[in-house]
Amino acid sequence: MAVSKKIETIYHNGQPDGIRSIRRNLSTMTVYVIPRPLLSEAKNISGINRPGIYYLIKESDDSTIAQLYIGQTRNGVSRLDDHNRSKNFWNKAIMFLADSKTFTLDMISGLEKFAILKAQESKRYKVENTVVPKYEIDEYDMASVEEIYDEIQFVMGTQGYKMDDARASLNQADILHTTRNGIEAFGVYDGDKFEILEGSSISHDTKSSLPEKILIQRNTAISNGDIVLENNEYKLKKSLSFSSPSYAAAFVLGSSANGWTEWKNKDGKTLDELFRK
């Protein structure tokens, strides 16, 4: 049976997409969501200068993570001033800051490294960290690091950001596929977003019926290395999220498609049969 979790959010400027502070019941950590244009305003929030780790995020058009950078801070939001000057890609920061001295400097370093490794393993987005810290996580600290990261992953999920490895977290029965025109692609649908899984093949050709926004997304994925040519076949190198099954099918097949009938499970049932009937 799933365990209920309580979470509280403060909207500091009264806007749902403005500065937010988030806290789980009994947690020793407060989370701050800071849109980049509001960085100066965020500095006025009490307690925002504590130590912890942070994510710099670039969102895609459908509000999923396209790029991110992970770092540690010993003086809270002030650390973001350097990134505001030197890093152009991000449009939002999410900071996980300790409410007490429960985050030692060693714990912060270990948590930073663990978070970077998890982000790279997930293959969901481009990770801007080119170097993984060489810090060695003490075996006695690892349990605490993993526990804190579980909370980070949960809070990020409440903001619409999936952090886990899409394929590793799935049961084979949940995976959908399409094999039309020699393309073999795999995905999963959660009732809201459709996610094409890393390793799927992508059509070389595009038809005039392909929606323009999907054509642009395909071209961008090719140019930034999310789609690569392997043995004369396009392969997806990271999982990508779409606002509808049909957009996901169009991305894979290179033409307009009805995703509700295109995607099927291992028993041959269409997404329409699984979710609508």
Image: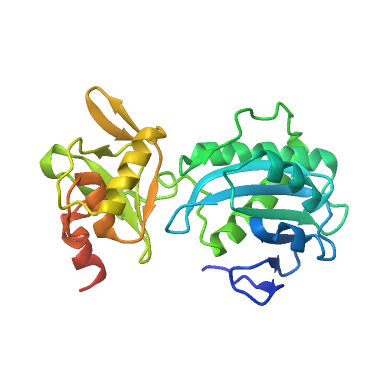
Query: Where residue 151 sits in the image (x, y, percent)?
Result: 65, 57
Q: Left or right: where does residue 96 sit relative to residue 276?
A: right
Query: Where residue 140 sits in the image (x, y, percent)?
Result: 77, 39
Q: Left or right: where does residue 174 sit relative to residue 16?
A: left
Which residue occupies 31% across, 53% down? 213
Query: Where residue 82 sits in the image (x, y, percent)?
Result: 75, 41
Would you identify the image quadrant in which residue 6 lies? bottom right
Q: Left or right: where does residue 205 sit relative to residue 77?
A: left
Which residue occupies 70% across, 42% down? 85
Would you identify the image quadrant in which residue 38 lies? bottom right
Query: Where residue 53 sits in the image (x, y, percent)?
Result: 72, 47
Observer-nearest of 185 and 27: 185
Q: State whether residue 45 is above or below residue 36.
A: below
Whether residue 174 is visible, yes or no, is yes
Would you identify the image quadrant in which residue 34 lies? bottom right
Q: State whether residue 267 is above or below residue 125.
A: below
Which residue occupies 46% across, 52% down? 60
Which residue ends up furthest to the left in the rendered image?
181
Number of labelled discs? 0
Observer-nearest of 198 and 205: 205
Which residue occupies 17% across, 54% down? 256
